[in-house]
Amino acid sequence: MPQMTLLPHQVEAVDRVVRHLQPPADGCFPSEGLRAEVVAATGSDKTLIAVEAARRLSARRVLVVVPGWGLDRMMQAAAAWRSVGREGAMVGASSFHPLDTPGLPCTGDPGELVSLVEDLEVVTVFEPYEPGRLGAMPQAHELGLAVWDLIVVDEVHLPPRVVGAAWAGPWAVVNDQERIPAVRRLYMTTAETPGSEGDRSGLESEGESGQQSGRQGQADPWAAHLAAARRFHAREGHLRVPRDHVEEAADESGEDGLSVRLGEWLDHIERRADELTAEGRMELSELGMRWYRMEREELIAVLQSNGSERARAAAEHLRAGAKFEVWSGRRASARHLFDVWASREQFILEDGRFKPGLAEAVRALHAAGGDPICLGAIYPAERSQNCSVFLAGDLTRCIACM
């Protein structure tokens, strides 16, 4: 990657970051990894500082944590990293609808996330911290996702708010070396944050104490969207909201004036039903939100009907008691999945490797055109035998298995 042109203040910041995050002379890394913080004014282009620091540190596997719910934040972060010179693959660790994330393949499935990034030499993953969920990253590491060379925690001056117990202390998860292991962490902020020295434990205090409930207006996206859902339900008597529907809701003063993209939000929530906390699920269930979970025997029958060797093996894993997940509300077009996996197949072929069922899956997804596809995963005891499952939108057929 060619070196970028930096302004003097950016050069100084990068030099300090690199110096602070260099491996110790004795080669013994602290148990919590190396940590540094950049405090810079708005408009000083902290993204450029982070990207150049990653280059100087030879960080090939980078996780960028973007606080707050919202598609725009994640897409803006990815575009910013690309625009200032970050190379390699980019992936979103979230389940936004594929039509909303052009050029950024996304998944909220921990198993698929591992499969997407495990063999990439250079990859940058963007994960938004969102209300009502615990995040896919810790589960992905439980499934064998490798250690990050660098985690960049962006906009630490905008810590996520807490909705009851729904967030379960998200900053604590970011800082937890056992749940999300990394060689280095770099915190970006426009103001000094609590706990900026040492292990940054101060970042956890707000989330764990619950003193900032965040249940007021726009400061709490979950509450604002839930209020809009309740308003729609009270007026229409149901929660079957068109995806492009925008609901007018009350702002912090209690007056109308807050536009909420309710249909898009509910679609997003439905596609990650298994990741919702009990509290978030209950609040939506009270409004008539429909949930569906595919049973083990149903999935076995669908896999058997596919007839491929990989699908038969997946069915046998299920009979042997393997864990599995099917995100019945999470749909993507077969065309989008074909684009993602055809590109991944090319990477694998160039590396001289082989992934069972991949070629057949790519052909099947191409043949399915624009049909909606539901994703699933099967986790045998031996991680190398994990299976990704692509089901028809109505869950009656297995399109592909690998």
Image (tube, helix red, strand yellow):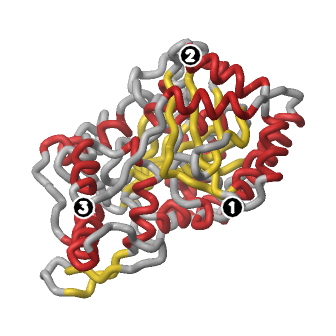
Dot 3 corresponds to which residue? Answer: 287
Q: Does residue 40 appear in this view?
A: yes
Q: Amino acid at mark 3?
A: Leu
User: Which numbered disc flags the more N-terminal residue, 3 or 1?
Assistant: 1
Dot 1 corresponds to which residue? Answer: 103
Mark closer to the observer (2, 1):
2
Q: Is residue 65 above or below residue 353?
A: below
Residue 114, picture quadrant: top right
Q: Does residue 14 appear in this view?
A: no
Q: Secondary structure at mark 2?
A: helix
Task: Give me the C-alpha separation between circle 3 and circle 1.
Answer: 35 Å
Residue 292, picture quadrant: top left
Residue 140 is tagged as none
Viewer-closest of 84 and 364: 364
Q: Residue at x 89, y 28 (%)?
A: 352
Q: Amino acid at mark 2?
A: Arg
User: Which numbered disc flags the more N-terminal residue, 2 or 3?
Assistant: 3
Residue neighbourhood size for the residue with mark 2, other residues' Cα within 10 Å, grouped as few (<14), some (14–19), many (≥20): few
Q: Is residue 218 above or below residue 34?
A: below
